[in-house]
Amino acid sequence: MCSPNNIELHTIINQELRMRSSLITICIATLMFLPKLATAQNCNEICQVEAVNNYFEALDKVAKKDSTPKDIDALLSLMHSDVKYVHVEYGAKFDLVSWRKAFLRNLNRGMYQNTDSNEQRIIKYIPGKNHVAVEYSHGVIQDNGQWKATEPLLAIFGFTEGKISLIKELW
C-alpha cells in the first residue's frame, strides 16, 4: 500500500520528469532554429549579386514609359520591410511606404519615359558582410546592339534576412 508520502514523492518525480522533457524539447527546437536564423540574417556574395541584379532589372521596368503600379510593387517586393533608401546628394530619405508614394507620384506625373533601349547595368561589385558597393551606370543600347554607358554611379546596398534593407546612393 502506498503511503501519502510515497504518492507525494511520485507526483513530484512525475512533475520533474515532465519539466525536464519540456526543457529538452525547447533546447532541441532552439538548436534546430538557430542555424536557420544565422543563415537568414546573412547575405553572402551570391545572394547580394542576385538581389542587386533583380533590383536593377525591376527598376528598369519601373522607369519604362508603359510602367504601372504593379511594376513599382514588384520592385518594392524585393525589399526588406524596414528598407531605407538614401540619396546623399539630393537629401532623399525614404522608408518603404514613402518610397512607394514617391514612385507613384513620378508615375502619375509621367516621369517614366524610358524605352526598351534604356538599361542600367552593373559595372563592378565589391562585396562585404551583408553589404555590397556597386558601381553601375545608366546606358542606351545602340542600333548596332552595343550598350553605351553614361557616367559611372555608386551605391551601397545592405541586406537583412536575404533582402535589400538599405540603398545608399553616393552620386
Image (tube, rainbow, N blue to C red):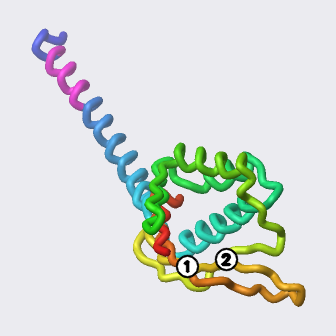
Question: What secondary structure do most residues of the magenta stretch adopt?
Answer: helix
Is residue 56 depicted above or below 66 in this figure?
below
Q: Is residue 96 visible?
A: yes
Instruction: Residue at 29%, 29% (x, y): give it.
Output: 18
Q: Which residue is mark 2?
A: 138
Q: CA distance from mark 2 to mark 1?
A: 8 Å
Q: Is residue 159 visible?
A: no
Is residue 136 depicted above or below 100 in this figure?
below
Q: Quadrant of the N terminus?
A: top left
Q: Position of residue 109 (x, y in %)?
A: 71, 49
User: Which residue type does callout 1 highlight?
Assistant: Leu
User: Which residue type does callout 2 highlight?
Assistant: His
Q: Which residue is mark 1?
A: 153
- Magenta part of the protein: which range? 7-16
Mark 1 lies on a secondary structure that is strand
**In magenta segment, residue 167:** no
**What crowding class fits label 1: few (fewer than 14 Cα within 10 Å), some (14-19), or many (20 or more)?**
some
